[in-house]
Image (cartoon, grey):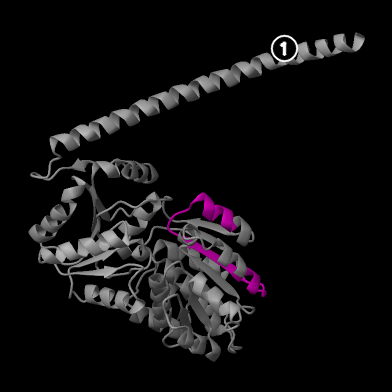
Amino acid sequence: MSVDAIGLSADLLKAVKACGYKNLTPIQQQAIPMIRSGADLLASAQTGTGKTAAFSLPILDALAKNSAQGTAIKALILTPTRELAAQVADNMKTYSQFLPLKIGVVYGGGKMSSQTNLLKQGLDVLVATPGRLIEHLNLRNVDLSQVKHLVLDEADRMLDMGFLTDIEKLMLAIRHKHQTLMFSATYSNKVKSLANQLLTTPKILGVAKQNSTSGKVKQSVYWVSEARKRELLSELIGVNNWQQVLVFAGTKESANVLAKELKLDGIKAALCHGDKTQGARNKALTDFREGKVRVLVATDVAARGLDIDNLAYVVNFHLPFLAEDYIHRVGRTGRAGKSGTAISLVSPKDEKFLENIEALIERKFERIIVPGYELRRDEALEYQQITEKRASKNRYRASQEKNQAIAKKNTKKTSPMLAASKKYNTKIKKKR
């Protein structure tokens, strides 16, 4: 469907076309009419499919057509991370460049004084992370009572990061009757529970199989010992001449070590994690986008907020603790219908995490072994022992569950006889 077909206001359509948009993505085609109807919405779609435009365009269009602008915040978009907040705000500013609307963003790591001034000047749309917005709310820097549109972007991630209490507090501050939209790339039970709590007779939208990755992304698993992961990564980058690689590490400490070792191998690398200031993180992202560094080493703080045009390669140096985060990491490549490559470096200690990922996305990966990187005999033996132990434990558990089921079934069969026996004994005791 063409962007001309949805009836956007002239100035909004002009901005959208300036962004190079010609056709709507599936999530946009289905979500925009639902949002325009005024209904609450719970939407699940693969990352990189255009969720931001799906909720931004109808909201901006509605605000632009409302003649009574004023200075009160009318739309609030909550995101789990600073990077995602900045990205959403930038997109909305671009979409509204020809509209008389003010878009602002507040998040942790930014200066409170400058954010306070921004809020006091008045905004039409505010993009924020829950924690920092609660700070401003407590300081009476912001009034949310007139919000008409509330968006929870990447709702599952916000729940994983412990923002439920903050979200509930913010809901109490929005006294005006409003529309609530929840967007998420994964659709967990926690998201469903929050939807039941916040949404009123919502429309449910899932344009892709839940908890799935894009078919445009080629995914591979390289089987290698933990001690040789960095060596293999450097070889893959060098031999294949990869120029832009996003690498996910498990912790801030391991990210620091990996970036340092890559530099020693002659590969320019930058860092993006929670210990870095916002200025340092922004510079790292800019250098990466502009090709000044070949590798950006990041922790999961970047998994939801990075939108890098034509990013070809994502590497999981360490697999994520939560299987759902694999989907978001992989989703940094193959965005907007483009192709990409995601590689996971997996050692025997990662096997359990890999099994969880395979179960979630319902796919079994072939373990690729690069010649020269075979496991040593002692490593292979240790892995075999662990695998056998796990298989034995699984067989024991299966046998235990089977016996419990049989026992439960037998109990149900004998329960009427036991009840009759107890009733008879009770009568005898009363006669005595």
Q: Is mark 1 on a helix, strand or loop?
A: helix
Q: Which amino acid does label 1 sit on?
A: Met
Q: Residue at x 19, y 32 (%)?
A: 381
Q: At which x and y percent is residue 219?
A: 25, 51
Give the residues drawn in magenta, as a range. Answer: 170-195
Where residue 274 sits, quadrant-wise, is bottom left
Where residue 82 sits, quadrant-wise, is bottom left
Q: Is residue 392 above or below residue 332?
A: above
Q: At which x and y percent is residue 321?
A: 37, 51
Left or right placement of residue 161 versus residue 298 in this view:
right
Query: Can you identify the residue that label 1 sits on?
Result: 417
**Quadrant of image for the N terminus:** bottom left
Q: At which x and y percent is residue 271?
A: 26, 69
* Residue 194 is covered by the magenta coloring: yes
Q: Residue extending furthest right?
A: 431
* Residue 128 is covered by the magenta coloring: no
Q: How crowded is mark 1: few (under 14 residues within 10 Å), some or many (20 or more)?
A: few
Q: Residue at x 33, y 79 (%)?
A: 279
Where residue 166 sits, quadrant-wise, is bottom right
> Is residue 260 shown to the viewer in this render?
yes
Q: Which residue is drawn at 47% across and 74% down?
A: 56
Q: At which x and y percent is residue 25?
A: 39, 64
Q: In this view, does 159 lie above or below 209?
A: below
Left or right placement of residue 409 versus residue 220 in this view:
right
Q: Is residue 76 above or below residue 364?
A: below
> Is residue 199 shown to the viewer in this render?
no
